[in-house]
Amino acid sequence: MTTLKLHNTKTRKREDFAPIDPQNVRMYVCGPTVYDRAHLGNARPVIVFDVLFRLLRHIYGADHVTYVRNFTDVDDKINARSAASGRSIGEITEETIGWFLEDMGAVGALQPTHMPRATEYIPQMVAMIEGLMADGFAYEKDGHVLFRVRKYKEYGALSGRSVDDMIAGARVEVAPYKEDPMDFVLWKPSDAETPGWDSPWGRGRPGWHIECSAMAHELLGSHFDIHGGGNDLMFPHHENEIAQSCCAGDKFANVWLHNEMLQVEGKKMSKSLGNFFTVRDLLDQDVPGEVIRFVMLSTHYRKPMDWTEKKREEAEKTLRKWYALAAAADGSTPDEDLIGLLADDLNTAGAIGHLHKLAGAGDAAALRSGLQLLGLMGDIIPAWAAQASFDLVDYEAFLSDARVTAMETKDFADVDRIKSMLVAAGVQVQMSKDGVVLTPTPEFDADKLEAL
Ligand code: AMP
Ligand code: ZN
């Protein structure tokens, strides 16, 4: 069996992955807060952890992996959106969840095994908070319940910082109901306009962090294998998840994985810089989801990734070539070199390099199965492959006609010109008395045909 190596944020080491139960490998990834379209950065963790999900299914079997990714559907940003738009919270979250699944499906992400919504797990959150209070890890003040950070000695171990360093580096909210500025909210009161649930501390709503702890416990148990998310979540969100869960008696996650952030043309993506766009914006500009995925995978998940127009163009050219080649093949088992690269802490950039080699060698079957494993064989495959062969059928007729004319006039200049352009576009040209046969080679580039 392939040995998977993963860089564990918690130990800061690359470790051999040993599942708690190989019959049920369990992974939790923090999902989106649902009030708006996913921006391009949001797609990065989705794609990264989708590759890991596919790899785990390949290694342990499709029925032996449980992947949970939540929807945060109670949050002050959602309340604000509702107040500003006059639309109900339920309408906004429902619509946003639909968009998210549609857009992430377009970039080739499989749906996780479970996609819990926070609002469906309020009783579990309340029970967890009650347990933490009973053991002195949490306290109530003015309708708020807070976690007593100083009570958990391991706090900060994930990011490797002391509590005092973290206070200095973060904007920690000082509030009259807190014993210590580091303490964070487990539960807060709701007014009549804000969504709320009855609880031992009055009508209120949960803090963000407790959601993940309660849902992971409910769906994956007290000890599971992998927890993932963007590295912007490491502190405070993941430190807080660990503190809550471990103080509630869970062992929680063995391996922590964090993806680095996405930038656009070398700059942080932001509305004020005018380089902010959603996945849907790209799809609407006819950028296929596979191209988005390809660009994302060409950078290792632990490195900052730069989205550029140049990379997008290159990715499209490469995929067009590959699809023309792969269309002719039947899928086969992905080759071991490719699995080895992915098992090396998800070396997706190396995996893409390997596909280049397979394509260069004309190994259509291995290329196709490699594309499949990476989730790059989506809807455009048939479209682009059909387009490639459609183009070639046209050119076959075109070249045949030119040839018939040339036989009559004895002037082969046109035939030679067409033939050399086809060859330059990566097409193998066979001419015999029976006619013309054109076959795409690994270098096939449909764009170059347009000059003809
Ligand atoms: P947010 O929209 O900030 O709640 O983030 C949702 C998810 O997207 C989290 O896992 C973040 O870590 C991730 N994320 C947000 N911005 C970026 C970015 N620029 N690059 C990569 N991941 C991001
Ligand atoms: Zn979380």
Image (cartoon, rainbow, N blue to C red):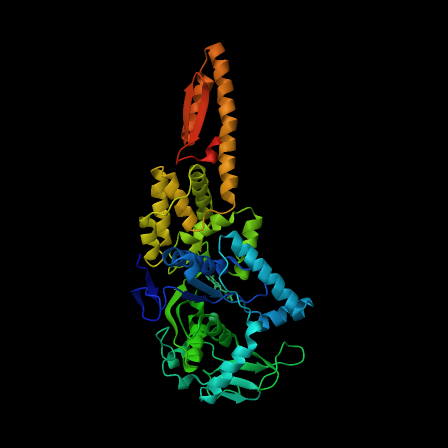
List x then y, in percent, for residue 412. Answer: 44, 15
Q: Residue lying farthest right?
A: 86
Residue displayed at 51% across by 44% down: 380
Quarter of the image where one finds residue 86: bottom right
Does 388 appear above or below 345? Answer: above
Which quadrant would the N terminus be assigned to in this image? bottom left
253 with respect to 272 (left or right): left
List x then y, in percent, for residue 306. Answer: 43, 55
Quarter of the image where one finds residue 149: bottom left
Q: Nearer the viewer, residue 446 or 105?
A: 105
List x then y, in percent, for residue 252. Answer: 40, 74
Does 163 appear above or below 27? Answer: below
Number of callouts? 0
Residue 450 visible in rendering = no
List x then y, in percent, for residue 301. Answer: 39, 59
Q: Nearer the viewer, residue 41 or 439?
A: 439
Does 369 appear above or below 7? Answer: above
Residue displayed at 36% across by 57% down: 59
Residue displayed at 32% across by 65% down: 18
Quarter of the image where one finds residue 21: bottom left
426 with respect to 4 (left or right): right
Residue displayed at 44% across by 58% down: 50
Residue 342 visible in rendering = yes
